[in-house]
Image: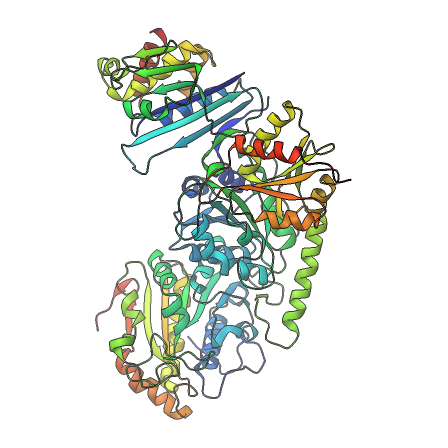
Amino acid sequence: MDFTYKKPEALTDVRTHYCPGCGHGIAHTLIAEVVDALKIRKRTIGVAPVGCSVLAYFYMNFDVTEAAHGRTPSVATGIKRVLPDRIVFSYQGDGDLAAIGTAETIHTANRGENITVVFMNNAVYGMTGGQMAPTSLIGQKTATSPNGRDPETMGPPIRMCELLNTLDRPYHIERVAIDGPDGVRKVRKALFTAFKAQVEGKGYSFIEVLSPCPVYQRLSPVDALRFVGKEMAAYFPVRVFRKEGTIINA
Amino acid sequence: MAKRVLMNGNDAIGEGAIRAGCDAYYGYPITPQNELTAYMATHMPEHRRIFIQAESEIAAINMVFGTVAAGKRAMTSSSSPGISLKQEGISFLAGAELPGVIVNVQRGGPGLGNIAPSQADYFQATKGGGHGDYHQIVLAPNSVQEMHDLTIKAFGLAEKYRNPVMILTDGRLGQMMEPLTLYTGRPPVMPPKDWAVNGARNRSPNFIRSLYLVEGELEALNIKLQKKYARIRKDEILWEDRLTRDCDVLLVAYGTSARIAKGALTVAREAGIRAGLIRPITLWPFPHTAIAKAAERAKGILVVEMSSGQMLEDVKMSVNGQVPVFFEGRMGGGVPLTSTILKRIKTIARIKKRR
Amino acid sequence: MLERILITGSGGQGVILIGKILATLAVKSIPHITFFPSYGAEVRGGTSACQVILSSKEIASPLSEVFDTIVCMNQEGADQFCRQMTKQSLVIVNTSLCKKPIVRSNILQMDATRLADGLGDTRVANFIMLGAYLAAKPVVSPLQAEKGIRELLAGKNMSLIDLNIKAFRTGLKS
């Protein structure tokens, strides 16, 4: 796959509301590049979550619908089942996907819906003001874990790729990280694999993107990238878990 | 006699949805609506339509959201506790101005309640249910035939107004079997859905949302919604009028209660008491004017419900204190008896005329 | 006409089935019909009952407080429902399972379960009772009924259909 470094057609030419150093803008661009590369812009439908990326429909130059918090994969299911030739993806944060919407996440994967789920894991709730996420690291200080996440009372962070990898139906499961230029290229490659799988009718694909949130990770943009690449990746291994329907051992 | 089949109310709704061109049905098991989910599981695939048993009522209503956002027809059904779970989704449908058909086969509550028939979800259905200033259209069948016919109507109304429509019924109507003449017409035809998210081919992208953060935008949406609700109030109110022209006692009841009230009405008339009945078929919008008119020369109104008196408030609002309004109801799955209603009718008939 | 029928028995005896069949058979000729099932909380066993109302006039409620005919397939059902009748009501009892005597003039006693055993399958006692009912009250002509039953059971195993018809005829003749 060759990518030309220009504004993708699948991205609108507006300034985003994302904070400096946020991973969402990067992920949006990568998705748009993949959509362009696969020439599917006119048949792509995105499902935006509740969370920081709730306004994603302003930035995507293709059809997008909102969904209630956590119900993103159900809405995607409802679209894909009646329009099987369209390319449907859900774009979800950690609160949306791994807390309030855990049931929908698991059952959509278990049915093997032919959709793509993009899971933006930045270990914190952004839009509501930096609360503890299901994926916040042990000891991580947030508005609702002021003394750091204590696994004894709050449970340890949930590893979603590993959890979904116990199911039979997913076709592709992969965790990648926005932690620098090389990481970004790998994110794009993973997204390409996932969207291509859907175009080919292979089934459910799940891409977890470890992502910086300098504001609520309470770090500078550069340190946030380091946090993603080192601390988050230490707990959430960056690798392919499922390839062409087959479990890949670490 | 036209060709009739014997069917229960739940199946009649299912067959109505299929004949109305429902593309997808999403359900979750709960008594007393399980026949409907099972009917759809069998028959939707036969018509190459979509059936999914969702992981929850919440997932089911959001699958409906996806399907109607994509411009197709969808329905979900449940019973009272499950309908509570769907309220968020219904509010989102209303906010995003999406059609969608929701069936509530009511059971006794609150809480897990029981599986007996009830009408205790009237407030939830007609006064909002979910958050925000919105209304859903609420249709209340009182026979297996109406379960079928109003389902077809529901799909038409939902798309005409881009608004959720609820069929509010109960376990008795759901499980009762009656002869039914099946709809053989075409599914309702509606204008093209140029707003749907179905791929931005030969047009600029569409987006569907209920989030409006810019100052004034959400108020503008609400004003638009209220204008739509005013149009619905003007054009879509339905009710059945039985012998109200000369009535001294006006009965007001819907659904199963209306069936019982009709029985009492017949006996009262045979006994020479001038009783009449208004049966609201749309519970929202509510036939306020029809009730006020029918009550003009009545000595009193008797509202019959399987609740503590919920529609009662709308009836009182209709007559605004001009006519005394009485109530006969049962709660927690109880169904009013014909004999009790008759006794109340006789008492009201003895009231001295006001004018 | 107005005919209010209650059919009661144990879950698994097929009382709901014959109620549904009776209501379905009546669709062609009787303008107003309701059928209403009631089950115990148990999925198997327990008392199950159904009500069928056949009427030339609109039916207000599918549930009646009194019945013109009560069909009792077991003792519990008989105990529970036999109060809901008038002097004219017809009671049809399955004497194989209802041992307590019911004292009244308008009674039809059928040794249905034993007769069904004789036919080779205890489960067809319900069709014997249906036959007995239609012999006593031909709300649907027995000939039409037999044709209808065959249609309704179409798709089932042929020998089973024949057995049910045989049971129906046994009830009809008694």
Occupied quadrant, residue A113:
bottom left
Q: Do we see residue B183 in this rendering? A: no
**The one of C160 and B348 positioned closer to us in this rendering:** B348
* Residue at the image position 46 percent from the left and 54 percent from the top: A81
Tally of numbered tags: 0
Please state if A235 lies on the left or on the right of B219 as rendered.
Answer: left
B26 is higher (above) or lower (below) than B97: above
* Residue B113 visible within the image: yes
Relative to A43, is A199 on the left or the right? Answer: left
- Residue A168 horizontal/vertical position (percent): 28, 58
Which residue appears farthest toward the top when viewing the image? C173
Q: Position of residue B23 (x, y in %)?
A: 51, 48
Find the residue positioned furthest to the right: B355
The percent coordinates of residue C49 (x first, y second) are: 37, 28
Q: Residue at x 42, y 21 (%)?
A: C151
* Front residue of this view, candidates A49 and C88: C88
- Decide if residue B15 is on the left or right side of residue A170: right
Q: Residue furthest front?
A: B352
Query: How is this picture coloured?
Result: rainbow
Q: Quadrant of residue A177?
A: bottom left
Residue A166 in the image: above or below residue B280: below
For the N terminus of chain B, the quadrant is: top right
Q: Position of residue C24 (x, y in %)?
A: 46, 23
Quarter the C terminus of chain B occupies: top right
Q: Nearer the viewer, residue C14 or A52?
A: C14
